[in-house]
Amino acid sequence: MELIINGTPRDIPEDRKTVGSLVEHLQLGGKKAVVERNGTIIKKEKHDEEPVQDGDTFEIVHFVGGG
Amino acid sequence: MLKIGGYTFASRLFLGTGKYADARTQKEAVQASGTEVLTFAVRRMNLFDESQPDPFESMDLSGFRLLPNTAGAKTAEEAVRIAHIAAAADMCDMIKVEVIGCDKTLLPDPVETIKASETLLGEGYTVLAYTSDDVVLARRLQDLGVHAVMPGAAPIGTGLGIINPYNLSHIVEQADVPVIVDAGIGSPKDAAQAMELGADGILLNTAVSGAGNPVKMAEAMNYALEAGKLGYEAGRIEKKYYAQASSPTEGLSRL
């Protein structure tokens, strides 16, 4: 399936059916990342129940140096 | 002690974490500064680019209060979204509201800053509002209920120091919440001046990260804040137009 991740279309394996499994696929485990799906923040504790569907738009953000 | 909302800090220096040459310098500078508060920005992750490591991987952040900013926001809506993201990462409920209204000067948009602050206060955040050195705007923000006002000394990253000490001293005089001078600080002299004018704290970044020796500069800033604060509490002398001898003018021995 195709997802828009951080503004770029990406081909993601069909078996990544939940936000949790997508996060795992992107190797974000342990990082302080925050996931937005179609403009809505998906809290970490909900990652394993929230679905991923073809065409979804994801923003995956984290904290960087800044003043 | 500096008290902002429900938080108390012994150090009055807030340190930004941007633009350090390397992680080790940053870590040592943070230690030398004595700061308890580190600021961060929220950005997209470089998911598919291994060459961009997490800048905080090597730092133990457990001893610090992490203050996310809304830098990058140009509207109240964008600032609120960034605050929500920061909250979802379980940082803390403090947020530095920064809504830029001019690309050239990076000066804040007053209308959007007010709107974003109002929304986030309503949602229970501890709001630190980055503002220009406008006296009336600072009062409007504190009337709104922000927990600290953060007037800029000068535009972000310029290092020009306090370009309007008159405005800043009026902001301090009328303030019933802490005043944290944010942005534009260039040297320890500027930091000391802000504290002598009665500021409660200072947030700076480039003045340290861009210094020839960031670790030494971080230490110097720590001293400068202390010196300025003590000087403010002590009360400086009046400025006089004519000289007044410090040594006795009577009993001079003639040759």
Image: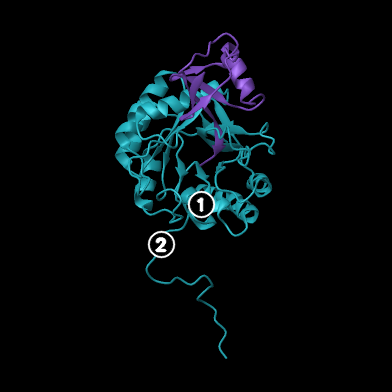
User: Label 2 marks which chain's residue?
Assistant: B
Q: Can you say whether B209 is above or below B39 in the image?
A: below
The residue to which callout 2 is attached is: B239
Total number of numbered discs in the rendering = 2
What color scheme is it? by chain
Q: Position of residue A53 (x, y in %)?
A: 49, 13
Observer-side mark, 2 or 1, equals: 1
Q: Position of residue B143 (x, y in %)?
A: 34, 28
Q: Which chain is purple?
A: A
- Residue B214 lies in quadrant: bottom right
Question: Would you call the spot at circle 2 few (<14 residues within 10 Å), some (14-19), or many (20 or more)?
Answer: few
Q: Residue furthest bottom?
A: B255
Q: Secondary structure at mark 1?
A: helix
The residue to which callout 1 is attached is: B191
Of residues B254 and B25, which is closer to you in this image?
B25
The first of marks 2 and 1 along the sequence is 1
Q: Can you say whether B60 is above or below B163 in the image?
A: above
Q: Which mark is residue B37?
A: none
Q: Are marks 2 and 1 in contact (CB under 8 Å)?
A: no
Q: Can you say whether B214 is above or below B99 in the image?
A: below
Q: Residue furthest top?
A: A49
User: Label 1 marks which chain's residue?
Assistant: B
Type of the residue with mark 2: Lys
Q: Secondary structure at mark 2?
A: loop
